[in-house]
Image (cartoon, grey):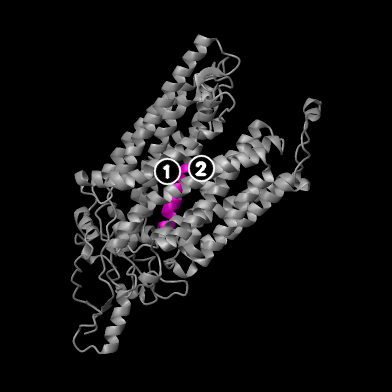
Amino acid sequence: MHEPGQDLKLEMLLEDDPPVPEPPPHVKYMSGSSRGKDASDKEEMQVDEGRVSDGSVDIRGHPCVKSKSGNWKACSLIFGCEVCERVAFYAISSNLVIYLTTVLHEDVSTSAKNVNNWGGTTFMTPLLGAFVGDAFLGRYWTITVSSVCYIVSLVCVTMSVSLPALKPPVCNVAMLSSVTGCQKASTSQICFFYFSLYLMALGAGGIKSCVTAFAGDQFDNNDPKEARRRMSFPNWWFVSISFGTMLSVSILVYVQDNVGWAWGYGVPTAITGLATLAFLMGTPLYRHQIPSGSPLTRVAQVLCAAVRKWNIPVPTNPEFLYEVDDASSFRRRLPHTSSLHFLDKAAVKPSDEGSMHKVDGRQSPWEVCTVTQVEEVKLLVRMLPIWWTNLMFSAVFAQVGTLFLNQGSTMDRHMGPNFEIPAASMPLFITATICIFLPLYDKYFVPFVRGFTGDIRGLTLLQRIGVGQILSSLSIAVAAAVEMRRLKVVADSGSMDFGQVPISIFWLLPQYVLTGICEVFISVGQMEFFLDQAPDSMRSLGNALYLSTVAVGSFVSSVLVSIVTRITYDSNGGWIGNNLNRSHMDYFYWLLAILSFANTLAFVWCARLYTYKSMHVRPRMVERSHS
């Protein structure tokens, strides 16, 4: 898990004024001190030196000036956009099953299936949003259009829970005792409500996929000071969205239960609207990366060019491979790597270049690709094993919103004589742990570990994820041990079929706290890894890959539950029956712990083989010499 050039990168980041590398022979600095330059050239040089060096432009397409754009002043507005998206999403998703069963009068099994389908769709749509952002609209306009779509969907959801015509009549006690039961929602009412939800999922796809990458665009990686700030950004980003989640699962859920659904959904709608307005007002501050075309097209070009030249040998010297050294472009070039050797055939120059089709004066990318484009595809391929070995964590984390809650609902939830904590409020301890531990991680843990590892981040990206994998296995093992203790109390108290088990719900606190600490390492590490290691032109896709682990991991959890239930089913319901006091959910937890530990070993093996992305550092403001 060693980062190539790590020592050099550390030196560059720690120095306030790093040495500028010598330009290659065919380029020269636009320096005002060059002989033969007049005063106007010097003035132009001074203006250029104040601009960002990664090719970022403002909303009008002009090069960004550092002092007037980007950094934390722009990030704070982008933070607000994402935090409010999280507030609205969790305000609706946390209590959605209750609304479906008590207001729309759906069956429990039907409502659970509908919530899972909607949640999975919400975390899969970022793949579409990333494609649109990277290929066509750019991240800013994708966020803007998606935010408008999101607000419209929230207004529709609020109308659905507020207007009597859009929901069935209130179900009273007389209806519950009658033969017919409660009147179910009509087809039109159901269609309008689920149309609103899936419109919300579509809007969330554009926001979730692009907002993190767009926030990362506000820091110039070629500037040591801004690069250092960017490394702290994922930690504070996660703290911010955790506070948004806390607001939703505590205050807004309480409003829904005790004040009304209209207020419970209307408040996050208004908050999101104000946040979107603030985001738009900050438009002059933002730095933009120009869309570089469809990432799928770039991948297809490399594969097509490599297959076309399958029988052509690759030169032993990578200098003979095709590359465009466009000094007028700020795109960072990727150096050649020796892995996935077959793909290098796409960059082999043809023997008869004159017979090849050219696009804009250059070789057609369907026939020969640049080394940078080939390396972009290699990066995606190398990231796939890391993505695959992170799915098990999402499968374990999925138990927080399902089996952990079922486990807690059977326990003594009293806090004093008059207050009973809802089992659904226990995830607050995860969020609180994140909000407390993340600043401590950034302020104390990173500098302490940096003294041993020499890495500017303290732990490398994959080391951080690896620690999270270990903690994930530990948290589910602790959950299994607590469940064994709960079942022992059940047996001793004789409460197999009735009442609460005389054991405090706060026995679950260790597994919730461990899950929160695990999130600090693995979730933030995953987000930073996929954002940092994705090609510059595909950062939104990298963020979408991170989010897709949640969706696919939840699906893996559902499959495991279905398989275990079918195999272990008996008169008591098997490992996961309706009566948890007669079931053996601890066996299922131990199974997850074993699978999680095995997955951690697979992750370590993949991490040891992984080669980190490296960059050619281009000197600032260079121009091709025509002399």
**Image quadrant containing the N terminus:** top left
Residue at 55%, 16% in the rendered image: 570
Residue at image point 36% right, 42% down: 521
Q: Answer left or right for 398 relative to 365.
A: right
Is residue 583 shown to the viewer in this render? no
Residue 493 vs residue 337, the one in the foreground: 493
Percent of width and height locating residue 61: 44, 74
Task: Name the residue carrying label 2.
Answer: 246
The magenta stretch is 539-551
Earlier along the polypeptide chain: callout 2 or callout 1?
A: 2
Residue 449 is covered by the magenta coloring: no
Are circles 2 and 1 on residues that touch, CB within 8 Å? Answer: yes
Residue that badge 1 annotates: 435
Q: Is residue 39 left or right of residue 473?
A: left
**Mark number displayed over residue 5:** none
Give the SS element for disc 1.
Answer: helix
